[in-house]
Image (tube, rainbow, N blue to C red):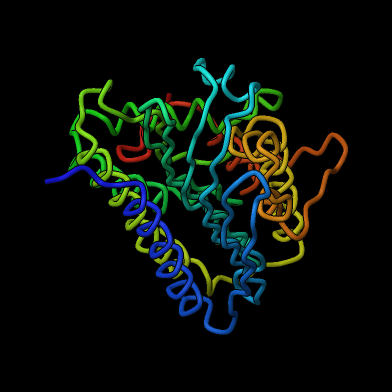
Amino acid sequence: MSQPSLNQIVGWFQSLQSRICSALELLDGAGHFTEDKWDRKEGGGGISRVIQADQIEKGGVMFSHIHGNLPESIAKGLEMEGGGFDATGVSIVLHPANPWVPIIHMNVRYFETDKGTWWFGGGIDVTPHYIIEEDAHNFHLQLKAVCDKFDQEIYVQYKTWADDYFYNIHRKETRGIGGIFFDRLNDDAGYSKEECWQFVRDVGDSFITCYTNLFKQNINKTYTERHVQWRNIRRSRYVEFNLVYDRGTRFGLQTDGRIESILMSMPPQAEWKYDYHPLEGSDEAQTLLGLVKGKDWINGTEV
């Protein structure tokens, strides 16, 4: 098997964006994506596709391929020399209207420099407004199956990485129930480029199945204004993480990316209520108890 070229990787990411958008339109049943093609003056550009509908209140499926000279601040953060680079990938965030349907995020990406450095990164994670143990169990089982196909040792490693990464330090709580997260996946980790590329494709291809299951399990559940208020409070925690900690947001801002695409992950509505505490024993309080690092969602064991 030959090594994938940059053009092959870019082309596959573009096809992934199209396939996911088509599947999401069918899932929503009424909404359609709008498309913006954009250029980056320093080099490259992307295709931003956004849906704002009844079921998926706001969602984005973003493709980008940018290139140019690596900014000094980015090179320093990556502990590498400056020079020419290419970065490409697909990023997705979906904010459903129904509070029982979770927020989902996926990113799959590739980075290379003109000095021969390359790596893949990405992951999928879920942020429920209300934690449903069965949904969490099934979601993590699906991700474990994808990881096991690549290496039967890495699910725990990448799951732990997600727990540590998607963590609001100032709140002392995870963003949601996690998932998997990985970065700088290359031959230094003991895998060939072909193996890394196949794994990233498997992660990308798993998105529709993961989200379809979560969506169909919960979309017909009824909800009240109390549920909507809690949804908006949980959305605000999502905003806090993306603006304070998320590396992708920082990379986009530091490389003079398109601001509408960078901030696509922001929900249409969110609330910050001062010193808010849910009623003890409520579904909302139970969800907060589940926002902890290290929980084994497959076997249902606590930290």
Q: Quadrant of residue 95?
A: bottom right
**Residue ID at (44%, 69%):** 18
Question: Farthest right residue?
Answer: 274
**Is 67 left, or right, of 265 in this rendering?**
left
Q: Position of residue 45 (x, y in %)?
A: 59, 54
Q: Is residue 165 above or below residue 30?
A: above
Q: Is residue 245 above or below residue 91?
A: above
Q: Position of residue 105 (x, y in %)?
A: 52, 50
Residue situated in front as seen by the camera: 8 or 298: 8
**Is 272 left, or right, of 199 in this rendering?**
right
Q: Is residue 274 above or below residue 142?
A: above
**Is 100 left, or right, of 296 in this rendering?**
right
Question: Count of labels shown?
Answer: 0
Residue situated in front as seen by the camera: 65 or 245: 65
**Residue ID at (43%, 46%):** 108
**Residue ID at (66%, 65%):** 58
Q: Position of residue 160 (x, y in %)?
A: 40, 27
Q: Position of residue 206 (x, y in %)?
A: 33, 56
Residue situated in front as seen by the camera: 127 or 204: 204
Question: Farthest bottom residue?
Answer: 30
Look at the image and tell me in which quarter the C terminus lies. top left
**Residue ID at (55%, 70%):** 221
